[in-house]
Amino acid sequence: MSEAIRITRAATKKPKPKDSELGFGTVFTDHMFLADFQEEKGWYDPRIEPYGPLTLDPATAVFHYAQAVFEGLKAFRGVDGRVRLFRPQKHIERLNRSARRMCISEMDPDFALRSLVELVGLERDWVPSSVGTSLYVRPTIIATEPFLGVRPAKSYLYFVILSPVGAYYPEGMNPVKILVMEKYVRAVEGGVGAAKTGGNYAASLLPAEEAHAAGFTQVLYLDGLHRRDVEEVGTMNIMFRLGDEVVTPPLGGTILAGVTRDSALTLMREWGLAISERQIGIDEVIAAARDGSLREAWGTGTAAVISPVGELAYRGERIVIHGGRIGELTQRLYQAIVDVQYARVPDTRGWTLEV
Ligand code: COI
């Protein structure tokens, strides 16, 4: 879509929170980006408007059958004061893959990128600067047709909202306690596990609540068929350092193709580490913990970046990893990623896009 973006500025500006007060996803900026889709017109009317509620018919398809996709990426204020998006093209590619799975019309990647650059550019004063803070960018597409039949909607709304954020987990970079989940699964082969769609997150609430009640921060999901192979940890991808190898489950359709997962794998390959994207059974993890070859485990995701796993609980057994402390590779990865994000080192991989 090459249409000009209409801009309506907010009459008043909201007060901005202090960096030290930032949590995750509770404060939103002054403007949002919107565009509509209709079957006969394609995507049209791109616009930036004051942030505010949407008015939708109660019959709107998304409320009933959850035909929707979203993304989550971040803009950072570098040590040079400039604002950069981290790997926005990779997030747009995934948005379109998720859209295909949910029968939502794809977006022109150049247009989607322009929407992010224009909105973040307009809201640049909202990008916090302390380490660990950023502007979280949430592009979303929802089915807007008021219709209760079960078929792909004929109209959609694309919107982008922005939220200045701090740490995702209150623990920050402190190692988290994880419950290996056998009662519930996150995804099955042929399902929607690889799509970033709200239903996956709704389905994760009950397992997470049960884990919280038992004293854990999150759950480790196993495969839906055998409840044997490790899949994801909470909303993040999982990686294990086993002996001299780093192992992470493959992108076989049941797990999300994490952008931080890809960044971490790229860095570790550059560092000459042996990486194996393969299925790994929970039994192998437990055996490695027992014989001492499980050296580190961590989750990767945009929101928390790297989240060390300090403890796994499985069938009543508690497995402490690296003495419950942050491992050396976990720390190195975190540092290397945030160094690029805050432009403390030159971006040699084309991961950042200045706004
Ligand atoms: C992430 O960025 O790691 C997530 O998936 C969490 C997000 C849905 C809040």
Image: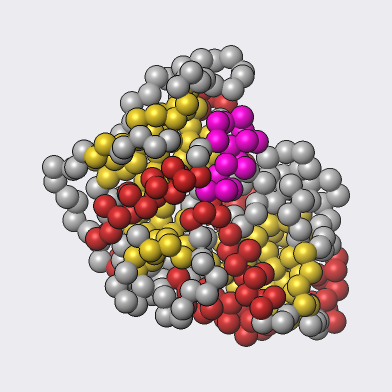
Residue 22: in sight, yes or no? Answer: no
- The image's colouring method is secondary structure
Residue 75: in sight, yes or no? Answer: yes
Q: Residue at x 31, y 62 (%)?
A: 127
Count of numbered circles on the image: 0
Residue 333 on the magenta segment: no
Residue 59's spot in the image, x, y percent? Answer: 46, 17
Q: What is the residue that sits farthest to the front in this orientation?
A: 2
Q: Nearer the viewer, residue 89 or 4?
A: 4
Residue 11's spot in the image, x, y percent? Answer: 13, 42
Q: Residue at x 73, y 80 (%)?
A: 273
- Which quadrant holds residue 279? bottom right
Residue 96 on the magenta segment: yes
Vertically, is 180 above or below 150?
A: below
Quarter of the image that includes the C terminus: bottom left
- Which quadrant holds residue 220? bottom right
Residue 24's spot in the image, x, y percent? Answer: 41, 58
Determine whether, in the image, residue 238 is placed left or right of residue 71: right
Q: Residue at x 72, y 82 (%)?
A: 272
- Which quadrant holds residue 2? top left
Determine whether, in the image, residue 188 is placed left or right of residue 110: right
Q: Nearer the viewer, residue 64 or 114?
A: 114
Q: Residue at x 67, y 82 (%)?
A: 271
Magenta highlight: main SS: helix
Q: Nearer the viewer, residue 223 or 74?
A: 74
| Residue span colored magenta | 92-106
Quarter of the image that includes the N terminus: top left
Vertically, is 171 above or below 303?
A: below
